[in-house]
Each structure stands twice: as structure tokens, then as C-alpha cells.
Amino acid sequence: MHGTEGMNTDGHANESAAVSTLEFRQVIPRLQSLLSSSRPLLRLNNVLVPISFSENSLRPLPYAAFLSRQFGCTITLLHAVYLNIVGEERGIPLTGLLEEMESAAQRVLDKIASSLSPSARSVVRAGEPASVILKEASQADVDLIIIGEQSRRGFSRWLKPSLSKKVIARAPCPTLVI
């Protein structure tokens, strides 16, 4: 070591500096082999964009369109229809309502997909949004999820994690939050 590099304030060798230097030296050959490899570092075949139709959920669309043009990947627009109410016990027919919501969401998603990219497709599923997103990401072999951040203010943001945080915590692939 040169001078005081890797030394703590007492003039003794700093163990964390030595460990990080060792780890860094091990990373360099791995990085060089990755960079010299003929296979691409980034493979994007299928990008998942969850859409709730809020303004924030639509923000990832230009990014998805860009990636589709650059990598030729498929964009999957996903909407989760979720009724967080107990209605049938009170005489409210939820089955018809759920089907109506799914049909309406499919029509809107189809329009967005057709204006976004020729390779975009739309999927509507019933269920709790985070679970639906994670299941679709796993089953459809998604390479990247691009999700809009919910803008919650005040005390509620501390009480319950946002949808994007739930997805990031359990996603089977990288997740980009816009």
C-alpha cells in the first residue's frame, strides 16, 4: 500500500479496505470475461409494464416504446382488476361487475398497445395487483418490469408499502421504477 491508503486513524491496516481490494481484484477478471464475451450483456425479449390507468402508471410507456425499438422486444401491458370489497354477501352481484371491468380495461389496453408498438400486447387479469404482476412476470418469462411509482403523501406512505416496492421485493427479474 502507498502512503496512508488502507490505514485507519491509528496507522494500522484497515481490514475493510483490504477485503474490498481483494474483492475488487476478483471482480475485474469476471468483468473482463463478460465484456469480451460474444453474447450480449443485456437481453430484452419481453418487457412487462403494469398499468392501472393512473397518470403515474402511464409514465413508463415511452421508456417501454424506446426499448422495443432498440431491442425488438415485446411489450406486455398488464392491468389487474381487483375488487377489494365484500359485496355478494350483501346482495351485490360482483361477478358481472368484474367481467365488465375486465372487458373495459381490455379495450383501453388494446388501444394503448396498438399506439405504442407493433410488438405490444395487452393482458388483463383479476386479482391483487402485486400478485398478478409477479405471477405474469414469472409465467411470461419477463426480462424487465417497468413500473410507475405511486405518489402517496403523508402518513399512508409509511403504513403500507407501495405497489412498486412490493414488486421490487419479489420480482423474478430486474425492475425499473419511473
Image (cartoon, grey):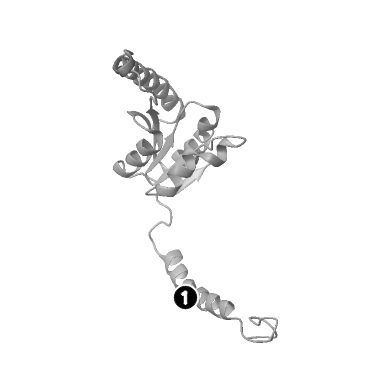
Q: Residue at x 43, y 42 (%)?
A: 145
Which residue, given by chain and number where applicable, does mark 1 sit on? 26
Residue 91 position by quadrant: top left
Q: 127 or 159, which is in the foreground?
A: 159
Left or right of residue 174: residue 89:
left
Between residue 111 and residue 156, name the one nearer to us. Answer: 156
Q: Is residue 53 above or below residue 160?
A: above
Q: Is residue 8 left or right of residue 52?
A: right
Crowding around mark 1 (Cα neighbors within 10 Å: few <14, some 14 to 19, many 20+) is few
Residue at image position (64%, 87%) is 12
The part of the image, by quadrant, that contains residue 50 is: top left
Q: Quadrant of the N terminus?
A: bottom right
Relative to 129, say whether 141 is above or below.
Answer: below
Instruction: Count the marks.
Output: 1
Residue 154, horizontal then vertical, whole percent: 62, 35
Position in image of residue 168 (x %, y %): 45, 47
Q: Amino acid at mark 1?
A: Gln
Work out whether residue 121 can be spotted: yes
Residue drawn 69% across and 83% down? 4
Image quadrant in which the C terminus is located: top right
**Callout 1: SS:** helix
- Percent of width and height locating residue 93: 31, 14
Q: Nearer the viewer, residue 62 or 96?
A: 96
Residue 126: x %, y % from top left: 33, 28
Q: Does the rendering let one see residue 178? A: no
Residue 18 is left or right of residue 116, and the answer is right
Q: Residue at x 51, y 38 (%)?
A: 63
Residue at the front extreme?
Answer: 90
